[in-house]
Structures are given as structure tokens and as C-alpha cells.
Amino acid sequence: MSVMPASLRYERPTDLPQAIELLKRDGAVAMAGGQSLLAAMKLGLNERKVLVDLQAISNLQAIELQGDRLIIGAMATHAKIAASPLVAHFASGLCTLARGIADQQVRNLGTMGGSLANNDPAACWPAAALAAQATVVTSQRRIPADDFFQGVYTTALEPQEIITAIEWPSLSQFSYLKFEQKASRFALVGVAVAQVKGASARVAITGLGQGACLWPEAGDALAQRFSVEALDALRFPEALAQTDLHASAAYRAHLVRVLTRRCVASISKENPALPVIDSKQSAIDLVVNTASKNEEAGLQIQGEQRLQASVEQVWQALFAPTVLHRCIAGCESFDQRSPTAYEAVIKLGLGPVSARFQVDVQIQDIQAPQSCTLVFSGNAGALGAGQGRAHVTLRAESDGSTHLHWQTQSRVNGRLAQLGSRLISASVNKLSGDFFREFSRQLSPPSPIQIPPSLWQALITRFRKLFSS
């Protein structure tokens, strides 16, 4: 069932200045391939007034060599990249990556620029750009990939800033492999290994849940010796991966190790096999058992913070409406109904999704001041609903600070559930992390203002002149 906005203005500019001007309108959004944005709009999860389609801007589709660098226009489709002899000559692995994205229909419409701007936590291009030290060229500036990707569905792009091209440096090695989630063909885990000429190899991972990231230990090992054996002693940290209904964090960490070895072997022509079986439980058992458990329990995410405040101060803040209001991203109102019950209106905006929730929160299982459980239910009307709970424990440290550990468990239904666990888990993970980071900031004492000695001396001299005149 499609729920497109009742009034939607469609614009199709033919040049970049026109597109930038159109994006200044209230409620305007740029559309590249539209493979994520239109799906969200059809579900009623993204209400926009002006859709600015970039497909008619022909100079954003070019693929060309400039010196020893490959320039791929932001609006070049995955299919065009996959079929390009120029890309194949420059780095055939980029063609292989493009051919493995979704299905032919998506490849015919989806674009490299759209993928990077959306920064889906399981997308392929962000990992490739990170590993290859690509540069994102926009209508305003040039942004290195290391600075461009800033978290789940979050990039360095400013409002009205448009990606125009992606610049790939001269590569001596490049390989990308992924283990697909069969329904969506997004990466359950994807690994890119790249080496810029004259530089060390880099390894980037996608599909872990928090967006593409580097595996620096693997890059360091390959810098010493580019071989599969150089990776033998490495284990990818399980804590950096996320568990969902498709796979456990342990299985994802296992896949990272396996795929990294296979990427290196595809370049060095070695045997990629692991030296020993280092788990009592097979990888297949890990993914199957975890998937069935998570399907019953719902999405589970956990984390911890070190707070520069006493346990008593942290405990009081957990029950303070003003503090909670400031810590919840997108919170439009937060009211206390009773000492342990609250209601709030929260606008969730993440990637292609924008939805407003009416949320009820109750604090239960209170063991003051050590632990409590926040039980919440949210309703977004026709879009669906969500329920969950967050268990919080506090532990006093010897230096007077507090160690806070939290674990959330959540479910969604309705149209929200149609987005799939990838977006929902990313949303919950980001919101939970943002909440507790802001909570930590609210409790941390402000840093004293440091005035440089030179400024003090200048002020003293100035006052002396004033009083002597």
C-alpha cells in the first residue's frame, strides 16, 4: 500500500545551480536513484513537499580519468559502473562490487552518489570508499572518505550540499567481497581491501550495524607483509559487531575474518583457509541459533558509559524530566505523569525515515540506586508502533565516578517493520547511544575556562594603561 504525500512538487533540474536553488525550499529533498527515499515515502515514512530529481544533470553521470585518478560522477548508476571498460581497466574490483549490488532493476537506477549520501550501515560503496581513501567531491568542497562517514545514515554533507563526483586514487590492489542477506542482498558483512600506490593497504568493513569502519589492525599487518598468513593471529573484535535476527555479533566477527582473508587471497593467489578451527560451535550454528533466539526476543543492543558523577547524582538524573528531555534526540515534549511514569513526543529522523512517536515510559524494577528498567511503548499512528525496555545498572568507581551499563530490547510492527531489521536496529542503536552520550555530557561538570598567559598579560597591560591615563 502506497502512502505518498497528498501534495508533492516534483522538480527535475538540468544543472547544478538550479538544483541547489530548489533545495533551499522548505521541505525539499534531493533524489539520486531514489531506491531508499522513494520506498520510505511510499510507506508514509518520509513526508517531503519538494522532490528534486538529479537524474537530468548530465555532467553528474560522467566516468573519466584525470591523470592517474578515476572520477566517477555521483549520478553514475551501479549498472553503468559495472559495465564501464574504463573502471574495469582502473580497478576491476569496483566493477565486481557494482555487479553484486541488489538486482538488475536496482542497479539500473541506484547511483554511487546516492549510496554514499544515504550511508546505509550495510551498503557496499562506503566500505570501498573508506578502504581506497576516495574523496567525495561536492558542490561546495572536497571531503576525504575518512571525514565523510560520520555514523549510521550520517555524513558530513550540509543542507543543500550535493555530491557531484567521487575521486578514486590510483590503486595497486583492490578487492571487495560480501556475505549477503539473501532477501535484500545487502551485506550481512562486506569487506574491502585496497592499497593506494605508494601507501599501505587498508581494510574496511560494512554490515556490522554502525556503518562502514576501518579494521586498522588488519591494515597494519598487511603493511608488514601483504599475505594471508599475516592475518593468522588477528581476531576481529566481537564488540564492534551487532546482533540482530539475521546473525550474532560473534558470527559477523567470524565473517569479517574469513572475508578479509579471501580478499587478500584473491590478490596474492594464496590459500585463504583459516589455520585452525578456533570455535567449539560452527559458524552455521552461530548464525542459526542466534537468529532463532533474536526472533523470539526482539532486537537487543547494549552499551556502557563512564560518568563523572556519583551514583546518587546519576540516579537522581534518571528520574529528572528536564534532564531526560534534553538527552532524547528529537524530543519535542516530555511530561511527568507520576514519579515513575512519563509521556513524550519524539520525532525520529534517520536516513530516509522521518516519523513522530507518542511515547509512554514507565520505570520499573527499581533497586535504588543500583538499577532500574525503563519500559517504553511508542505509537506512530498509521505507520506502526514499537515496544521495548532498557535495563540500566549503576556501579560506583573508586575515583567517585559511575559506571553505567545499559541494555535495550525492542520490537516494531506495522509499516515500520517493513523497513527491515537493518534500518530499525540502526535507529535503535543510534538513539540509545546518542541518549547515553548526552546523558553523560549533562552530568559532566563544565570545563573551567583556560585563559592563556599571553592573554592575561595583555589584559593586565591594558588595564594599567587605562588607570594611568
Image (spheres, rainbow, N blue to C red):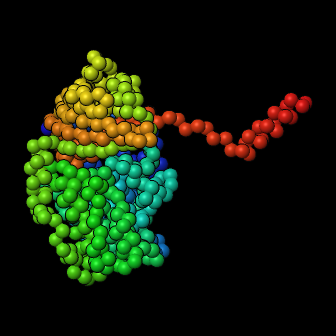
Using the image as rendered, state which of residue 447 and residue 42 is in the foreground. Answer: 447
Q: Position of residue 338 (x, y in %)?
A: 27, 16
Judged from this view, the residue extending furthest toward the top is 338
Judged from this view, the residue extending furthest toward the bottom is 269
Using the image as rendered, state which of residue 93 and residue 8 is in the foreground. Answer: 93
Judged from this view, the residue extending furthest toward the front is 398
Q: Position of residue 176 (x, y in %)?
A: 28, 69
Looking at the image, is 286 positioned above or below residue 173? above
Residue 208 seen in the figure = no
Q: Position of residue 278 (x, y in %)?
A: 18, 68
Looking at the image, is 91 positioned above or below residue 302? below
Give the residue at x 29% y 72%.
Answer: 233
Q: In the picture, which quadrant includes the C terminus? A: top right
Looking at the image, is 204 positioned above or below residue 48? below
Side of 447 where 452 appears, left or right:
right
Residue 133 seen in the figure = yes
Give the residue at x 27% y 52%.
Answer: 209
Using the image as rendered, state which of residue 122 and residue 369 is in the foreground. Answer: 369
Give the residue at x 25% y 82%.
Answer: 270
Looking at the image, is 17 positioned above or below residue 389? below
Q: Position of residue 413 (x, y in %)?
A: 15, 36
